[in-house]
Image (cartoon, rainbow, N blue to C red):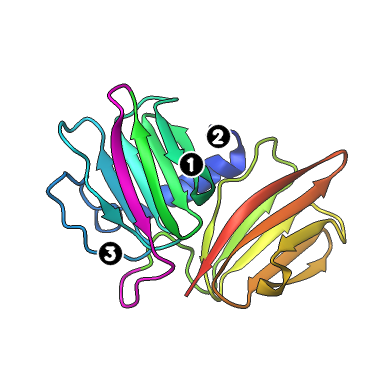
Amino acid sequence: MRTPWHHPRLVSAVLLGLLLTPAAAGRPVTAKAATACEGAVVHSVDAAQPGALPRLCIALGGVVRIINLGPGSLAAQPSTLVDCFYAAGTHQCRLIRAGTVRFTLAPDARALTVQVPAAVPGQPTTACSPPGSVVNLDTTEEMPWWAPCLRIGATLRVVNLGPGLLKAAPADAVTCRYEAGIHACQFRRPATVVFTATVDPASRSVTAVAVR
């Protein structure tokens, strides 16, 4: 599991923090919480609460926020379904692919299971950047990027990168335009897309989620 690294990640954490109003993040849940599926929201779980952890259902693009848990104390399987970072006693994990992910919390090995559907129609999508907004990823920053989630109509920009140096997979899910060191990408459809920027002599990648 990756650890916090960069100013873009810190910026992402700040932006996410703006989403974590009481209405968006909600109160930390307990084992008695309902298991009805939520949209792509930020859902908080308090690891300091005793007893079994709840079984959750949160749409693709949402965030599982586990508070009161120290560094190196969270494992996710399969790890390909999430992108997590840690800061100040909180693990924030973006759900980047549909499926079922099992989080294990140390030291007591309690399990938190999260079902991740591709979408939950009619439910809020508060964990993703809204249409018309812009998410910037700067290649001059030293650290990797935490996975963003954008609603269709938002723009993902990779800045300070020359022409022909950004790849997207699957390529047919996005349309990217380049001008003056900026790659501006818009999603054609809901998808999970891996962007790879070639920054001599290495490259860096980020997984972005697009939802309606």
Give me the residue at 25% from left, 50% from top. Answer: 55
Q: Please name the residue that numbered disc 1 is placed on.
A: 84
Of the image marks 1 and 3, the number of the one nearer the N terminus: 3
Is 120 a magenta residue?
Answer: yes
x then y, percent, for residue 84: 48, 41
SS at mark 3 in the image = loop
Of the image marks 2 and 3, the number of the one nearer the N terminus: 2
Give me the C-alpha separation between circle 1 and circle 2.
6 Å
Q: Please name the residue that numbered disc 2 is placed on.
A: 2
SS at mark 1 in the image = strand
Mark 3 residue type: Cys
Q: Residues within 10 Å of mark 1 (few under 14, many from 20)?
A: many
User: Do labels 1 and 3 touch, CB within 8 Å?
Assistant: no
Viewer can see residue 181: yes
Viewer can see residue 18: no
Give me the residue at 29% from left, 46% from top. Answer: 44
Which mark is in front, 1 or 3? Answer: 3
- Residue 184 found in image quarter: bottom right
> Residue farthest to the top?
107
SS at mark 2 in the image = loop
x then y, percent, for residue 123: 31, 72
Give me the residue at 76% from left, 63% from top. Answer: 183
Of the image marks 1 and 2, the number of the one nearer the N terminus: 2
Q: Please name the residue that numbered disc 3 is placed on.
A: 37
Q: Is residue 117 above or below residue 89?
A: below
User: Do labels 1 and 2 touch, CB within 8 Å?
Assistant: yes
Q: Is residue 166 above or below residue 73?
A: below
